[in-house]
Amino acid sequence: MKTPDFSKVQTTQTAAEAEILLGLLRAAGLHPRDLLFSGHFTFAGAETSFPIMVPTEELAEAREILSFRSEA
């Protein structure tokens, strides 16, 4: 069985925001990677830059679902 390739659809500044977006994607039937496995960056002891990763074949749909953020 082949492991799916993942692509970054968006990056958030907080884990809380990332979890909300992951919930939206899951509610739409997509399969985003859990934050635990996506990795994030730490700067001066503060966690920041949380990537939202989805299977590459779901990337276009994930962008469409999350596009509401740029329209507001």
Image: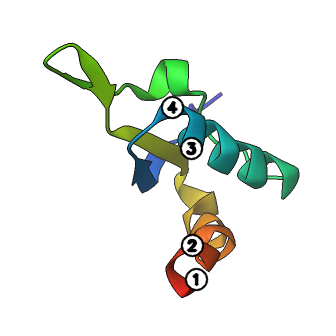
Answer left or right for 37 relative to 19.
Answer: left
Residue sitting nearer the eye, 21 or 60: 21
The disc, 1 or 4, on the residue closer to the chain's N-terminal end is 4
The disc, 3 or 1, on the residue closer to the chain's N-terminal end is 3
User: Outermost residue, bottom direction?
Assistant: 71
The disc, 3 or 2, on the residue closer to the chain's N-terminal end is 3
- Cα distance between the residues tagged 3 and 1: 16 Å
Q: Are marks 1 and 2 in contact (CB under 8 Å)?
A: yes
Quadrant, the N terminus = top right
Question: Is 28 situated above or below 33?
Answer: below
Give the residue displayed 84% in from the left and 58% down from the top. 28
Which three-letter amino acid code belongs to the residue tagged 2?
Arg
Q: Name the residue under label 3.
A: 17
Which three-letter amino acid code belongs to the residue tagged 1?
Ala
Circle 1: element type: loop
Question: Is 66 situated above or below 36?
Answer: below
Q: Where is residue 29 in the image (x, y as percent from the top left)?
A: 85, 53
Q: Mark 2 points at which residue?
A: 69
Circle 2: element type: helix
Q: Are marks 3 and 1 in contact (CB under 8 Å)?
A: no
Would you call the spot at circle 3 few (<14 residues within 10 Å), some (14-19), or many (20 or more)?
few
- Cα distance between the residues tagged 4 and 3: 5 Å
Q: Name the residue under label 1.
A: 72
- Cα distance between the residues tagged 1 and 2: 6 Å
Q: Where is residue 35 in the image (x, y as percent from the top left)?
A: 53, 27
Which three-letter amino acid code belongs to the residue tagged 3?
Glu
Q: Do the residues labelled 4 and 3 touch (CB within 8 Å)?
A: yes
